[in-house]
Image (cartoon, rainbow, N blue to C red):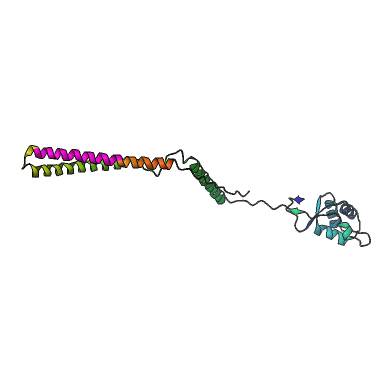
Amino acid sequence: MATNDSNRVGLVISNTDSIRVFLSGASNNPNLSDEIRRTSSDLVSESDVPYQSLRAVWFASDPSTRPELNRLFSGTRFVFSSPKPREKSEELKARLKKLEEIAERKAYQELVKDITPNKDVAEPFSSYKDQLGFGLHVIVTMFTGYLVGYAAFRALFNHSTAMNAAGGILGLVGAMFVETFLFIIRSSNADSDKTRRSHKKPKFASSTIKKNQ
């Protein structure tokens, strides 16, 4: 049994019939002080009484008429007061709410990571910087292939202008084939990595926050 009366301090015991009879007699006893009789009258109807108040009434009563303590306390039990709920500060509430949101977001990401694209996997030419860099790389490679072909045919055909130009064009086309082949290899590797990640089984992680009520 518990009580929520925060005004009562010290030991509290349950009220019994023997205690009510004793308090009722004390409240009508003209030999006791007004304060003792008023205290006895107030405690008669209570479901539990403070031990100190009951002890004060018992000591003030006539020893020849008051009951013995062991008989007076027979059948009683201790009554413990319910602790006051601890109030959480606004800062603590805000921190708990933030941690709960972070935990829920992480849990959701774990649940959907097998059906959503991985943000860490960069798609080929996904930005203007990649596209511009690839274009400049192709131009430099084609120009280098043209120069190599032009120089090779110039050394072979005694500075013939037509053959030199044909050699440069041949070198340019060869450079284009090399760039195309390298581009296919890079794209195939990226697709393979993406497919391998998508077939990995997700590892679900559960996280909870204990809420203090």
> Which of 190/7 is in front?
190
Indicate the position of residue 72 as horizontal and vertical percent values.
88, 57
| Above or below for 115 versus 7 | above
Left or right: residue 134 versus residue 163 is right
Relative image position of residue 196 (x, y in whole percent): 41, 42
Residue 50 in view here = yes
Residue that appears at 33% across and 40% down = 188
Image quarter of residue 36:
bottom right
| In the image, residue 60 above or below residue 147 | below
Q: Measuring from the top left, give residue 65's x and y in whole percent.
A: 93, 59
The image quarter in which residue 183 lies: top left
Instruction: Residue at 89% x, 52% y: name it.
Output: 21
Q: Residue furthest right?
A: 64
Reply yes or no: does residue 170 show up in magenta: yes
Between 156 and 20, the one nearer to me in the picture: 156
Numbered label tally: 0
The stretch of residues the image draws in magenta is 163-184
What residue is drawn where x is 13% and y is 39%?
167
As drawn, is 107 to the left or to the right of 42?
Answer: left
Residue 197 place in picture, x, y as percent: 42, 43
* Residue, far front: 156
- Residue 157 vs residue 60: left or right? left
From the viewer's side, name the closer residue of 33 and 198: 198
Q: Is residue 25 magenta?
A: no
Q: Left or right? Give the position of 74 relative to 173.
A: right
- Residue 124 visible? The answer is no
Residue at the (16%, 40%) spot, across then down: 171
Q: Main secondary structure of the magenta part?
A: helix
